[in-house]
Image (cartoon, rainbow, N blue to C red):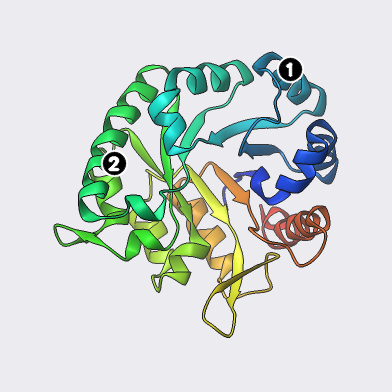
Amino acid sequence: MRKMGIGLQLFTLRNETAADFAGTLRKVAELGYEGVEFAGYGGLSAEELKALLEETGLKAIGAHVSLDNLRNNLQGEIDYLKTIGAGYIACPWVSPEERTLEDWKKNIAFWKETAAEVTKQGLVFGYHNHEFEFQESIDGQFVFDAIYAADPANIKVEMDVCWVKFAGQDPIAYINKYAGNLPLLHLKDFRKDEEGGMITLELGQGEVDLPAVVAAASEAGVQWLIVEQDNCQNPPLESVANSLNWVKQNYLALV
C-alpha cells in the first residue's frame, strides 16, 4: 500500500483544546500523529499557531470552517490557513433548517463559487459529509453526489466513511467512485444503539471494514487519513491513542 499521512480531527478533543489548546496539541504530537485538522484555533493568532506547529512538528492539514464563516469571513479564513501552512478548507456541516431542496441548490452554487476562489488563492476546498446528504436527491442523484458533480475540479471530497455506512451506502464503492478527487478521508468507526442512532467508537471496534477502507483509500489517491471520534467512551486522549495504535498495527506496519 501507498503511504498516506495520519492526522487527527481536533473536534474529537474539543473539551481538551478548550481547556489547554497548546498543551493538547503537544500531547497529540507526542502520541505520534503527523498532522491535525482544526475545528477552531483556540483563540491563537495565525502566527502563534504557526509557531506552535513548528515547535511540535505537527502539519496543519486544514480546517473545518462553518458555512457562516465561509459566507462572512472567507478571506480571513484563507489568510489564516495560508499563514499556518495548511492546504485544505472544508465545509463540515449544514444545519437542519438549510436542508430543503432549494437550500441545497443555493448552497451548492455558493460552494462552487467559494471553491473557485479558494483554488485561485492556492488552497483546496472540500466538503465533509454526514448521513443527511444521502436523504435528499437532486436530479436523480443524492445530494452527496450533486455537491461534487457541481465542480469536480475545485470541490474535493472529504469523505467520512462512518457516515457513509451509517446512511446505508457502501464506503468502498464510494471511495472507488471518487478516486483521484478524494484527498482527505475521515477514518472512524461506529455501532448503532438500540434506537438506531450512531455510537462512535475507537478504530477497529465497530461495523466499518476499516482494513478494506484503508486499502481502497490508498488506491484512490487519498493524501490524509484523519482519525475522528465524535464521542468517546474513554478519556478522549486515550481513545485517540488507541485509534492510532490500530492504524500502526493495521496499516503503518504494512506500508
Q: Quadrant of residue 5?
A: top right
The residue pinned by badge 1 equals 48
Q: Residue furthest bottom?
A: 194
Q: Position of residue 233 (x, y in %)?
A: 76, 67
- Label placed on residue 12: none
Disc 2: CA contacts within 10 A as few (<14), some (14-19) or many (>=20): some
In the rendered image, the vertical position of residue 1 relative to residue 192, given as above or below: above
The residue pinned by badge 2 equals 107
CA gap, disc 2 and disc 1: 33 Å
Q: Could you tell me the amino acid type at mark 2? A: Asn
Q: Secondary structure at mark 2?
A: helix
**In the image, what residue occupies the spot 39% across and 24% down?**
118
In the rendered image, the vertical position of residue 170 relative to residue 23, given as above or below: below
Q: Position of residue 174 (x, y in %)?
A: 38, 60
Q: Secondary structure at mark 1?
A: helix
Between tags 2 and 1, which lies in front?
A: 2
**In the image, what residue occupies the spot 30% across and 46% down?**
148
Q: Residue furthest left?
A: 139
**In the image, what residue occupies the spot 34% across and 30% down?**
115
Q: Is residue 150 left or right of residue 239?
A: left
Q: Position of residue 216 (x, y in %)?
A: 48, 59
Mark nearer the N terminus (2 vs 1): 1
Return the residue nearer the eye: 86 or 212.
86
Q: Is residue 9 visible?
A: no
Q: Quadrant of residue 106?
A: top left
**In the image, what residue occupies the spot 69% across and 63% down?**
250
Q: Could you tell me the amino acid type at mark 1? A: Glu
